[in-house]
Amino acid sequence: MVVPDVVMPGDIALVHVTIENAVATSTRTESVTHTNILDKSTSESRDVYLVIGSVFLDGRKDIRVLEGNSAFSGVLGPGQSMGLSFLIQAPEKSGIFFPQLRIRVRGGESVIYPIPVNVNVPVYSMKKPTIQVSQSDLPMVAPGETFETELSITNIGESAAQDLLVSVSMGDLMISPVGPASSAAPVLAPGSDLVLPLSLRVGKDIEPGLFDLPVAITYTRVDGSARHETAVCAVDVRGASSLAVSQVRTDPITVSAGEPFDLIIRLENTGTGRANSVSAKIDLPLSGTREAFVGSIRPGNDAPAVFRLNAENDGDIPYAVTARYSDDYGDHELLQPMVLVVRPKGMDGAVIAVVIILVIAGAGYYLYRRRVQG
């Protein structure tokens, strides 16, 4: 091993080597034949020791060995190893050089082992595929809706991806596929892409928010190694507001001509998103306040729009209430026709007098009937 992996011209580096006695024992067998029938053989096993005379790193004119030559000589027993280091200096030119490690073993053959030394030469790794997943858009949908989007799977690497499989998982989210949610390709060449169209349905009871659907990607590299990667498909769920008139009342309950009163119209949000900047306006031909600002209304809640008016004339007066509001999908308007009943002035006293007269008349008739029967 050379440290560093890439040596600059003229720089100093270290070469680390390990010498190991990989042979544990040797066996010698002798056979002796006494007759044509009887054979005799003997076996003898003994440990093998390596007697190393010298270890020498030959720079071969290009690499200069500064320290480490002849640093070890001795005996290595079975399974024993020894680490050695050599201090070298790289030449002033770039290239791949192969100094030779020479090990002299007594009673055996010497070993010559070349060691590559990289001097300022870039070494590129194996070309690999790189899979990129992109989404055509970020769909904004309301709970209960079905929407469509698509994923583009592109190989931006330098080699082909084989046996490519892309699948979208919903997990425990309230989002389910309508149709296929996976696609495959036997080979995806560099620069090629695979389009996965998706049709998804969002549950009605889902809470608004940004959801990431996991995308599983599996493929095989050119060297046969399998790859497993993940990406996401994003969905922006936003509720849509919807206003309706839930109640209309006046204070006092009976409106009389010439008297002031409050008209209270309650607006209810029956949608799935917040209604913002809610305001209401009426076109009653009466003096007073005919516009009211409500604010925001959460889903399932209501809020009052209060108008303070003066009843100038009696009769059934038709009018319309216009409510304006906004949500994530834009501005909206509600137009609701209404009728206001205004009684003539003094009508309440006359009604009370008639009721009292009827009560007295009824009581007198009851007493008269009892006397006649008695």
Image (cartoon, rainbow, N blue to C red):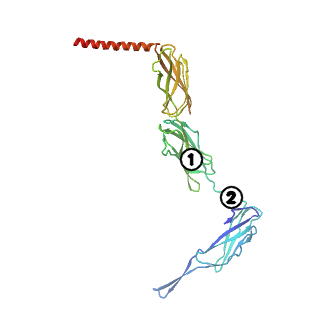
Left or right position of 356 against 263: left
> How many badges with numbers are in the image?
2
Q: Nearer the viewer, residue 218 or 340?
A: 340
Q: Identify residue for label 2.
A: 123
Q: For the residue carrying disc 1, how many other residues have a C-alpha within 10 Å: few (<14), some (14-19), or many (20+)? A: some
**Residue at the image point whose x is 62% and y is 53% from the top:** 128
Q: Nearer the viewer, residue 24 or 192?
A: 24
Query: Residue lying farthest bottom?
Result: 34
Mark 2 / mark 1, whichever is N-terminal? 2
Q: Is residue 260 above or below residue 183?
A: above
Q: Quadrant of the C terminus?
A: top left
Q: Quadrant of the N terminus?
A: bottom right
Left or right position of 266 against 59: left
**Residue at the image point whose x is 31% and y is 13% from the top:** 362
Q: Quadrant of residue 353?
A: top left
Left or right position of 269 against 100: left
**What's the distance in space between the residues labelled 2 and 1, CA to CA?**
31 Å
Query: Residue lying farthest right?
Result: 92
Q: Identify residue for label 1.
A: 231
**Residue at the image point whose x is 70% and y is 67% from the top:** 14
**Callout 2 amino acid:** Val
**Callout 1 amino acid:** Ala
Q: Secondary structure at mark 2?
A: loop
Viewer-side label of 2, 1: 1
Query: Residue lying farthest left?
Result: 374
Q: Whole-percent x and y of residue 290?
A: 55, 21
